[in-house]
Every structure is written in structure tokens, then in C-alpha cells.
Amino acid sequence: MTATRIDGKAFAASVREKVTAHVATLKADHGLIPGLAVVLVGEDPASQVYVRSKGKLTQEVGMKSVEHKLGAETQEADLLSLIDALNSDETIHGILVQLPLPKHLNEDLVINAIDPTKDVDGFHISNVGLLGTGQKSMVPCTPLGCLMMLRDHHGSLSGMNAVVVGRSNIVGKPMAQLLLGDSCTVTIAHSRTKELSDVVRRADIVVAAVGRPEMVVGDWIKPGATVIDVGINRIDAGVKEDGSPKTRLVGDVDFASASEVAGAITPVPGGVGPMTIACLLANTLTACCRVNGLPEPEGLTA
């Protein structure tokens, strides 16, 4: 068996197309332009690249894009003041504070200062609680993207056995809640789960989000299962001609062995990753619709 490759890059492009069309309708029919504000504190290189990509794609779908770049020495009071101003800005419908923050800043305090209706990352404690109790919330982007791809591949997920490997607040826990919401039987496993391979082997759906390179191997996968690999790990790949170290990106799943057993699988890169920004745009659109009492975009929410 050779697994079907779930193309996250192509799927993300289709999500952005839907967002673009809905944004155009909002402009034409209601004079509304969804706005996304991204706040970057410090000069982390990976964060800078990510923020630039977000800004570019936000503009491409017709939204308003605002970036606030603050120095690493920024004090908590100043950051909270900026968030308060964005909360009050009616032209901004989504606020994202890029993580990680410098160590002197309290991430929980900062995240929970964002208006929950504008919390397009879905990290505010109010949104976590709403999701956990099955109510309408802003949903974290990566789990939302995983859910969209699973629904697209399977249609109904009802009754399927799902194992989420990883228990983070960003992916593992909200992913489990979303799968429960779609009537899966869900197990949350992690690095300390006893007989982890046996637990994973029972799953119709495996979501790997544990942060360990190629931890989940083909022997762990139930034949025909769908594997969603959230991991992004950079590992050693020898040396370049100039003697400098060479690296490559891999997921939490050993793609080569797993793809021989699974029915469908996401690659790394090109799987879940592109969906995260696409779902950020979808969440911003959803937030704009909700605050203005308009119907939510079909197929772009949980």
C-alpha cells in the first residue's frame, strides 16, 4: 500500500481562494474590510520571516494588514497598552502577538489581554474554555487546518478512533477537542504514554504533534489509517561543500515507513504548515463576520 499524499500547500491555496472571495463580497455588499494586526516583539529570525509571510498573504486576500514591530526591550506595560488600543480599533478584527515573547514578558498575561473576539490564534483562556465546552469560539489555527484536511479527505469523522500524540495547549489539546466535536473517539497520548506504539496502532486517525523527529514509525500505524504530521523538526543532514552543517526538515512521523502502511498522510514540509497561515486568514474573516452580525463563511470554521 502506498498512502495518498495530502497536499497541504494546495489545500491552503484553496482556503485562501475562499477567503478572497468572501472578503470581496464583504467589501461590495457591506463596505467591510477585515483587518489583521500582528505584533512582533524582538528580532527572532524565524518570527520575522513568519510575520512577513503573514503580512503578504493578508494583503493578497484583500484584507487590511497592520504590523507593529517592537524592540526586545519593550516593557510589559507598553505592550499591553498597544493591545488595548488594537482592542478598541474597529478596523482591526484579528490580533496576533507573535510567540515566543522575550523572557521578561508574561505570555499568558499578554495573550489574555487580547479581546477574545479578536483572538485569531485561539489562545485566550475564554476561547479555550468555549472550545472545551463545545461552544462557538476562535479555534487555534493549526488544529483547525488539520480538521479541515481530515473532513475533506473523509467527509464524516463520526465514530472514528483518533489518537493525538502530544498534549500542548497550542495543538494537542485543542485538536482533541475538535475531533470530539466531530464525534470521534479520542485518545490523547504523549511521550510518557505506556505502550505508545500499541495505542497509536489502534487509531483510524493519527495526529502527531509531539515535537520529536520521526518518532512515529510505520510499524505503529494501522493499515489504511490517516496520518496528520504536525511536527516540524530540523535535523542534521551532513555537511555542505564548504564544510558548513547541512540540515533538513522532517516531521514527527517517519514519512518513508509510514507512507507504506497508511491510507493517507501529510508530508513535511508541504502538509500542515501552509494551513496554519491560511486558517489565520480564515479566522480573521470569521471574526469580522461575527462582530458585524453576518453569516460565517462556510467551510472555514470548526
Image (cartoon, rainbow, N blue to C red):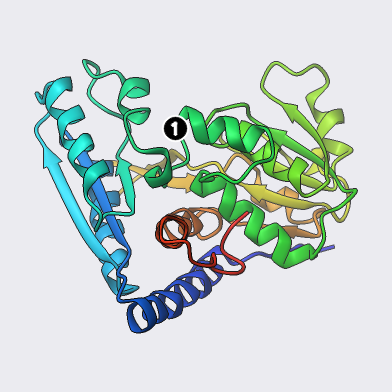
Residue 182 in the image, given as x and y percentages of width and height: 77, 49
Q: How many marks?
A: 1
**Relative horizontal placement of residue 149, taking residue 138 as reference (left or right):** right
**Relative horizontal placement of residue 248, taking residue 35 as reference (left or right):** right
Residue 46 in the image, given as x and y percentages of width and height: 28, 43
Image quarter of residue 104: top left
Q: Is residue 62 above or below residue 109?
A: below
Q: Residue at x 82, y 53 (%)?
A: 261
Tell which residue pokes out farthest to the bottom in this image. 28
Q: Residue at x 72, y 50 (%)?
A: 227
Kind of element beneath mark 1: loop
Q: Residues within 10 Å of mark 1 (few under 14, many from 20)?
A: many
Looking at the rendered structure, the kind of residue marked 1 is His
Most foreground residue, 73 or 259: 73
Residue 99 in the image, given as x and y percentages of width and height: 32, 34
Most foreground residue, 193 or 111: 111
Q: Is residue 243 visible?
A: no
Q: Is residue 211 above or below residue 231?
A: above
Image quarter of residue 284: bottom left
Q: Residue at x 68, y 24 (%)?
A: 190
Most foreground residue, 159 or 288: 288
Residue position marked by numbered label 1 in the rendering:
124
Most foreground residue, 49 or 212: 49
Residue 82 in the image, given as x and y percentages of width and height: 16, 36
Q: Residue at x 33, y 21 (%)?
A: 109
Q: Which quadrant is the N terminus positioned in? A: bottom right
Image quarter of residue 33: bottom left
Q: Which quadrant is the C terminus positioned in? A: bottom right
Q: Is residue 188 visible?
A: yes
